[in-house]
Image (cartoon, helix red, strand yellow):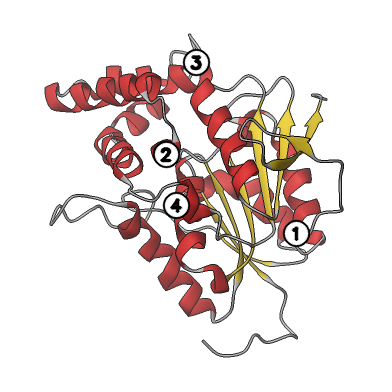
Amino acid sequence: MPRPDLSQPDPVVLLHSSGASGAQWRALAERLSKRYRVFTPDLCGYGTAAPWSGSEPFRLAHEARIVHDLVQSIGEPVHLLGHSYGGAVALHFARLNGALVRSLALVEPVAFHLLDDRAEIEAVAGKVARAVACGDFVGGFGAFVEYWSGPGSWDALPAAKRAAMAARLPKVAMEFHAVLSEVADMDAYREINNPTLIVRGALSPRPTRRICELLAQALPEARLVTLEGAGHMAPLTHADQVNDLIAAHLEGGGRHEARQPRIGRSGDLARELRFGTR
C-alpha cells in the first residue's frame, strides 16, 4: 500500500447493520464529509452489493473482503466504524488487518461467538432459520426486529418497508451463522491496539451489552460509552448522540483522554462513560 497522501482528508469507512445498507449512515456521512473522505459500502446482498454466491458456508471473512478491497482501493489506513452486524465485520477486519486501521468505533457489535451463554441469541437465530426454511420471511423478520426494538416496532413500520426488509431474511440467517460460528476467542482480540470507541445502549438486549463489556475489558485502547435510555438501534433512535460521539472520537484521532478506570468483571481495566438522553 502506498504512503498516505497527507494533503487529503483522512478516510472513514462506515459499515451498516443487518437488513440495512450504506444509506443507514446518510446523516453521519454528510456531517463527517466536511472534514473526512467518507465511504459507506453496502455489505454482501444489500444495496448494490452482489448476493452471496452460495459456493461454501458463509463466514465473516467473506464479508470482510468487501472492506479489504475498499481499503486497498483507498490506498491508506482508514478510520473504521460498524454498527451491529457491521460492527462484527469491523471487529473481524481490525483483528486481522490492524495496520490498515487508524481507529475503530463499534456500536454494539454482534460478536456472539465471544459469549459463554448464547441461549438467548441462539433462540433468536433459531426463529430466523426456521422462518427461512418454511418461507415465512415476514414473520421471521418481524421477530428479528422486535427482539432488537421491542414489541410493536415491526407493525409500526410502513408496509412497503416491511416487505423490502423481509426479503433480506435469508441473508440475516447467514449472518447469524457467520457470527456464531466464528472461531476467534477473546485472546485474539486483545491484540487489537487501535484506539477504539465502544458504544452500547443501556436498554439493549443482554447479549450485546455483555459483548461490549467484554471487548472494553480486553482491548487495550478501548473506551466504553453507555447511552442511557437507548437501545440497540441507537444510531437511528439517538442519532445525534451517537454521531456526536463518533465525531469527537475521530477529531481526537481516535485517541481518548486518560480517565478514571473501572474494574470489569474479569478484573481487567476498562473505561466507561454514561450519557443521559437528550
CB atoms of marks 4 and 3 within 8 Å:
no
Q: Amino acid at mark 4?
A: Val
Q: Which residue is mark 1?
A: 250
Q: Nearer the viewer, mark 2 or mark 4?
A: 4
In the image: residue 259, left or right of residue 173 = right
The residue nearer to you, when weighing 225 against 141, is: 225
Instruction: Name the residue at the top extreme.
Output: 151
Instruction: Look at the numbered disc 2 and give the secondary structure of its residue.
Output: loop
Name the residue rendered at 53%, 21% in the picture.
206
Question: Does residue 151 sit above or below 91 in this rendering?
Answer: above
Report, in whole angstroms, how far the alpha carbon at label 1 lies from the one at label 2: 24 Å
- Where residue 251 appears, x then y in whole percent? 81, 60
Query: What amino acid type should be assigned to the residue bearing mark 2?
Result: Ser
For mark 2, what is the residue? 18
- Which disc, if any, is residue 89? 4
Q: Is residue 212 above or below residue 42?
A: above
Q: Earlier in the sequence, mark 1 or mark 2?
A: 2
Tell me if I can see residue 49 in this picture.
Answer: no
On screen, residue 46 above or below 135 = below
Report how far apart the C-alphas of labels 2 and 4 lie in the structure: 11 Å
Q: Quote the CA–CA distance across marks 2 and 3.
A: 16 Å
Which amino acid lies under the numbered mark 3 shown in the image of this protein? Answer: Ser
Q: Nearer the viewer, residue 260 or 33?
A: 260
Q: Which residue is mark 3?
A: 153
Q: Neighbour class for label 3 at 10 Å: few (<14), some, many (≥20)? A: some
Q: In terms of secondary structure, where does tag 4 sit?
A: helix
Q: Earlier along the polypeptide chain: callout 4 or callout 3? A: 4
Image point 42% across, 47% down: which residue? 185
Q: Nearer the viewer, residue 261 or 72?
A: 261
